[in-house]
Amino acid sequence: MATPTYRVFDPLLPQPQADAMRRLCERFGTYGMYSQEASEAEIGQGLFQRHDAVMNFMKTGGRFGRQADPGALGARTNYFRESYAYGDRIAIDGIEPFLGYEGFVEAARAIHGRPVIEPAIVYANILLAGQELAVHTDVPEFRGANRTLYPQWLMVVMHHSGLFDAYRMPIATAVGWFNDCRGGAFAFYPDGREGACQTLPARANTGIILDTDSVFHGVDPVDGPPPPLRHGVQLVWDDGRWALRDGDRVVARYGWDEVRFSISWKAYCFADEAERRAWREHRDDLALDAILDRLVGDLRERGRIDGQRPEPTALALLLIDEYVRFPAADAAARVSA
Ligand SMILES: [Fe+2]
């Protein structure tokens, strides 16, 4: 994978604009839970969409090496997410300046060395007290292969294998924070999985941009006990506070300092207009059979498959095991946790 770089923004926006982002979050009002859904695809049926990250989290206890109680896993890691903009579709007025923010566009060019930047999505993540985000790399995208077509873990395997670089759509991801909370630092590995982990506190009106498809990253726990989550709960801005609603019932309330609110921005980074056209017009797309044949061929060369191709779920687990290598639990973080 290419050498990752990142840029920190501090401050991120002029103060009135930063304040407006928090008001926009309140105005949007209702946030649904973003949870790990099982994959429906034939390859790896029954695996989590992010089987790679979930299994690593359960095995290692995350960056702090705490042994996780599998029953509490959902409450700790199922946070809240809504999209504010998706391509040209604007879901809430006032997000346009963030979507087209020139500081992100210019930094995105620098990160991938690609001049043609197309902002694709802006979405909000809200973590409650007691929640965290397991270390992972984001779901990348390739010409002809993305998360709407195939399991997310397969996209991750493809990128980590390095076998499909010619088809990859480099994406730059920026994250901005617009409130102060206790805990919830952004933890990332800018020098690769064997390099040191760096942390950035989630402070109001700061941000970072990086290649989150390549750089492992996560969110340290937000201080406080895990929330009483059940399937279908919603987080609603209600009379100056956040209310966690289970149907008509409010099961918990949070002040702004007890939640972690971030806005993510993702943009495609093209080398030139011709590359953008090839992607838009689906010239030169990958297909699933070709992807799996290439991966299986590589596993044979690596001595991981001898004889018959394993059945789909066994193959999926083998692919994740062989290609997605996570950073070790952080010894320094473990001591201080
Ligand atoms: Fe991520």
Image (tube, grey):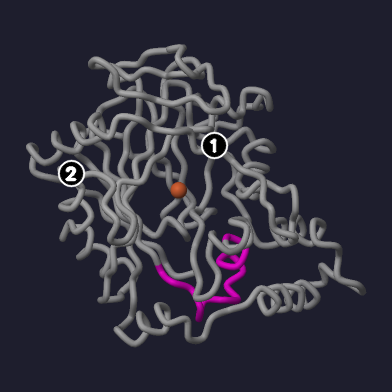
Instruction: Return the x and y of residue 55 as percentages of the image width and height.
Output: 68, 43
Instruction: Return the x and y of residue 62 as percentages of the image width and height.
Output: 58, 36
Q: Which residues are magenta?
A: 156-170
Q: Residue at x 22, y 58 (%)?
A: 104
Q: Residue at x 49, y 38 (%)?
A: 34
Look at mark 1 in the image and give the residue it sits on: 63
Q: State the SS at label 1.
A: loop
For the residue pair 306 and 3, the one nearer the viewer reads as 306
Tell me the number on the disc at residue 10. 2
Q: State the SS at label 2.
A: loop
Which amino acid type corresponds to the residue marked 1 in the rendered image?
A: Arg
CA separation in Å, label 2 and label 1: 25 Å
* Circle 2 residues within 10 Å: few <14, some 14–19, many ≥20: few
Dominant secondary structure of the residues highlighted in magenta in the image: helix
- In the rendered image, the residue lying farthest to the front is 248
Which amino acid type corresponds to the residue marked 2 in the rendered image?
A: Asp
Q: Is residue 162 magenta?
A: yes
